[in-house]
Amino acid sequence: VRATGTVEGGVLLGDLFIVGGGDPTLRRSGPHSLDALAAAVRAAGIVQIAGDLLGDDSRYDAVRAAPGWRPGYLPAYIGPLSALVVDRNHYRGDAEFVTDPVMSHVALFRVALSRHGVRILGANRTGRAPTAARVVASLSSDPVEALVSQMLTRSDNLIAELLLKEIGLSVRGIGSTAAGIAAADEVLRTLGLDGSSADGSGLSLGNLRSARQWRLLLQAVRDLPFGPLLVDSLPIAGQTGTLVRRLAGTAGEGNVRAKTGAVAGVRALSGYLSTAGGRPAVFSIVVSGTHIGPAVTRAIDGLAATIAADRN
């Protein structure tokens, strides 16, 4: 939260900005929330704002979806993308919110400020905070490593998309999906892999990698410095994340660590396991077609379990 102007007798003679930093985990209430920020503004001695309350999500571009998403994916599978996120941008699903969620977040913050005794005389708006605007209150997300772990374990689409925009900002100076893809694909090419990503989450129909490409990627990253973190962050069959109810009672339970994938017409499972014979294995299974349902998922799990049970 940043402010312009001076504070005299508890009155801010300027505007107050809530500035999004790309954190996908901010909530309306709780320890990491708009309510916590509002309490911090009041604790800073501000009881009235003479100017306006503004939302600033300029860290990233204003493109709310990634190329290749089907219309039904937003907001069913993921909230609209923005640098200022509240409750995963998923507490409303109407067209106005999907187009621009920031004004709704500003309205929520105004209510939170009011609850803590901070009165705002001006209007709700959006706009970029001036560079000279001073910090009144702030919250930090978990470190990127922890966000990546959450993303992989839960198959979290929103974290994936915002991290991709953050990569674009960090590497290319532009907080956009396109810039993030350009940076990521450049790394993939250094690993000898085809650079043909379409988004960060895998929801896009433009993601056309083969099972072989995924397997080669998993082999390549396993030995990189961040490899152990990636492997440890993958769901464990029968135990955690998106695999908590899968492969139970098979040789894959507690053994298979893999990323799931599920969009219309496609099911996938890619990861690592150890065979009963003691060999480490890297695998990727991708099934696509017009009739993809539970039977396909069972077949994928059956194949992974069979590999895990191999004693050779």
Image: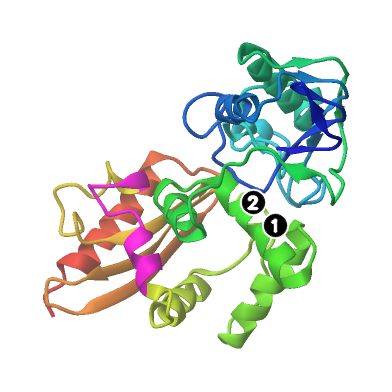
Image spot of residue 298 (x, y percent): 32, 47
Q: Is residue 233 magenta?
A: yes
Would you say 160 lies left or right of 233 here?
Answer: right
Depth check: give the residue in front, 119 or 154.
119
| Residue 234, image quadrant | bottom left
**Residue at x 28% of width, y 75% of height:** 281
Instruction: Choose between 107 and 188: the one closer to the eye.
Output: 107
Q: Is residue 212 above or below residue 163?
A: below
* Depicted 130 relative to depicted 43: above or below: below
- In this picture, which residue range is highlighted in magenta? 228-242
Name the residue type under label 1: Lys
Quarter of the image for residue 126 reads: top right
Horizontal side, residue 71 vs residue 30: left or right: right
Q: Is residue 285 left or right of residue 238?
A: right
| Residue occupied by mark 2 | 162
Asked if residue 199 is among those painted magenta in the image, a careful observer would answer: no
Q: Within 10 Å of the Cα at label 2, are there few (<14), some (14-19), or many (20+) other Cα atoms?
A: many
Instruction: Answer above or below: position of 277 versus 250.
Output: below
The residue pinned by badge 1 equals 165
Q: Residues within 10 Å of mark 1 (few under 14, many from 20)?
A: many
* Secondary structure under the numbered disc 1 in the rendered image: helix
Residue at 15% from the left image edge and 66% from the top image edge: 309
In the picture shown, does residue 217 fall above or below 27? Answer: below
- Which residue corresponds to the image point at 48% horizontal and 69% vertical from the top-left? 211
